[in-house]
Amino acid sequence: MGAEFDLNRLRADLVAYLRRKDRGGEEAEDVAQEAFARFHRSGHDVTAADARPLLFVIAKHIQLDRWKAAGREARRNALEDVYDLDSGPHALASPAPRADQQLIDRQNLAAAAAAIRALPPKTRDAFLLHRFEGLTYRQIAGRLGISVSMIEKHIAEALRQLKTSRGD
């Protein structure tokens, strides 16, 4: 991002990314706001070199959590016709993820962010432009001034490193 850091541009890019990934909902603005809040509460600096990928990963996880919660809510609402939710086994169901799952999710997020930060600059740039900006390999090649086949190699390497960081 360098000396010409533009918070409005970062926010607009994040909202655009979330809208592209959205499943018909209109929550991109809310998710972006929550991502910035979590990012800030975690003590990160939005002007740091690794802020953008970390912010996008946080937003992606928030969006996934919201989709899961919506799915759980839909299933619970479907059960209301069959069960009385004030009694029986469904009365204790909680919409919140379990504490151990939240810890695992945070650890996975930290590992992914660290793996992205550790990538060589061209590999990291190619990966971020493709995954978070939605650019094609040809567009990335033009922007970075290298061949499409090199972009393919960079992205394959980034994916391999991320998979390795997850322990797969």
Image (cartoon, helix red, strand yellow):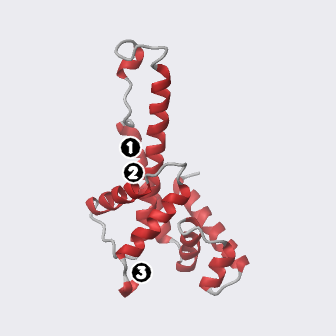
Q: 10 Å neighbourhood of mark 3: few (<14), some, or many (≥20)?
A: few
The residue identified by callout 2 is 106
9 or 47: which is nearer to us? 9
The CA distance from mark 2 to mark 3 is: 25 Å
Query: Looking at numbered disc 1 in the image, what kind of residue is underneath it?
Result: Gln
Secondary structure under tag 2 reads helix
Q: Position of residue 11 (x, y in %)?
A: 40, 68
The residue identified by callout 1 is 102
Q: Is residue 4 left or right of residue 167?
A: left
Residues at circles 1 and 2 in contact by the CB criterion of under 8 Å: yes
* Numbered label attached to residue 1: 3
Q: Position of residue 56 (x, y in %)?
A: 45, 63
| Residue sitting at x 43%, y 47% | 105
Vertical side of 27 occupied by 144: above or below: below
- Quadrant of res 51: bottom left
Query: Looking at numbered disc 2 in the image, what kind of residue is underneath it?
Result: Arg
